[in-house]
Amino acid sequence: MPAVAHLEHSVEPGGAELALLRLLETGPAWDAAVFVPRSPAGAGAFAPLGELVHVLGVRQPAGAIGGSRRARAGMLARVALHAAALRVTRSFRRCDVVHANTSRAALIGLLATTGSRRRLVVHLRDAVDEAAMGRFAALALRAALRRADGVIANSGFTLDSARPWIRPGAAVAVIPSPIGIDGARPVTPPRAAVTTVGMLARLAPWKGQAQLVRAFAEAFPTGDVRLQLAGSAAFGEAPFERELRALIDELGIADRVDLLGHVDDVWPLLDGWDVCVHASTRAEPLGQNVLQYLAAARPLVATAAGGPLELVDDGETGLLVAPGDVGALAAALRRLADEPGLRERLHRTAAAWRPVPPDTAIARAHAELFARVAAPRPAQAEARAARMAAS
């Protein structure tokens, strides 16, 4: 089996980090090691992996890649130092494949593998789009893609955004993120009335929490229906959390809105939500929350852009609304509250179709991709055969 070095630039519990944690908790069919930068949190989100985790190099503060020129220069210096630390680490040097789990990890991986025998796999969890990630980040990711031996994308939408920069011959696969399920989990049927609307996503302006808060206030100006927002203000988003709390107070709904922070076990929470919401204001590759909502067979509303369109069938497994359209989102929430038959149909269809694969199937897809990348290239295979014949 190939030895795979999984590179991360953060130990905060973001979507990419949790996806990698779940992947490695499946007992993967490869020799895994996780390399994370130094942080006051130690191994942070990866602590459950124990001895698989190697903490080394230098800190990688959030937000620098989209900051000022000075901030970007500092980030590049830290990336270079971290890559240098990896190159001299014995546990990294023994690996055959380097799996860069995030965009910044891809830049680290590019520097750490250049001129070596190690193969680079870039994991795309966001569209390679200057409007989405900024020009500097997009340029850095494109450079890594041109060198990559393999590319994993979390949706067809994400892969299509990267195709112009993927080098010919690279192994490519679309693999959704693992979400913490193994097999067909039991699902909870909808209740007769809507009592709780929920959204599972880290707090960030583009994730759409502010739009959902406004839509909730419009759809349920009075009454007992609650809104629950599960997700932490990771990666430097504490100012947005303060703005969100101020908006909730301004709208007069603070007594009916719960900011739950990061939630480790999301399934009991989802089973208690009558309506689940994905409200990203731009085309998102494929948020894990959409996968989790569908796996729990919850009635859901999602924005009609990007990866969610590959899984959410409007009127069958969920309702679709335009990104950033508060009025349309409020109308969808109100419709689901007023039509129990619609909620029941969305639930039954998602439960019957089971559109989200279990984590074990996702791990097998990763294993196949890593094996393809690690396989000897034709010239190497011929040279090896010649050496064996000569001996």
Image (cartoon, helix red, strand yellow):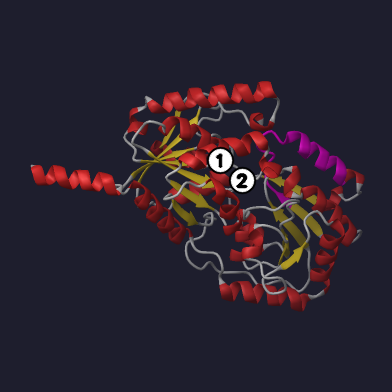
Secondary structure at numbered mark 2: loop
Instruction: Name the foreground residue: 214 vs 158.
Output: 158
Mark 2 crowdedness (10 Å alpha carbons): few <14, some 14-19, many ≥20: many
> Residue, x 34% and y 46% (percent of image)?
374
Badge 2 amino acid: Val
| Residue contact at pointers 2 and 1, CB within 8 angstroms | yes
Q: Position of residue 358 (x, y in %)?
A: 49, 62
Using the numbered discs, state the Cα–Cα distance from disc 2 to disc 1 in whole angstroms: 8 Å
Instruction: Name the foreground residue: 205 vs 131.
Output: 131
Residue 231 inside the magenta-drawn segment: yes
Q: Specify the segment rendered in magenta.
A: 229-248
Image quadrant of residue 340? bottom right
Instruction: Name the foreground residue: 389 vs 102.
Output: 389
Badge 1 amino acid: Arg
Q: Judge from the rendering whether residue 60 lies leftward or rightward of residue 369; answer left or right.
A: right
Residue 220 visible in the picture: no
Q: Position of residue 278 (x, y in %)?
A: 71, 57
Q: Looking at the image, is mark 2 or mark 1 earlier in the sequence?
A: 2
Q: Which residue is mark 2?
A: 128
Mark 1 crowdedness (10 Å alpha carbons): few <14, some 14-19, many ≥20: many
> Residue, x 91% and y 44% (percent of image)?
250
Q: Judge from the rendering whether residue 39 lies leftward or rightward of residue 229; answer left or right.
A: left
Q: Quadrant of the C terminus?
A: top left
Residue 102 inside the magenta-drawn segment: no
Q: Which residue is mark 1?
A: 142
Q: Position of residue 171 (x, y in %)?
A: 42, 52
Task: Reply above or below: 359 against 56.
Answer: below
Q: Judge from the rendering whether residue 143 lies leftward or rightward of residue 246; answer left or right.
A: left
Residue 305 visible in the picture: yes
Q: Which mark is residue 50?
A: none
Secondary structure at numbered mark 1: helix
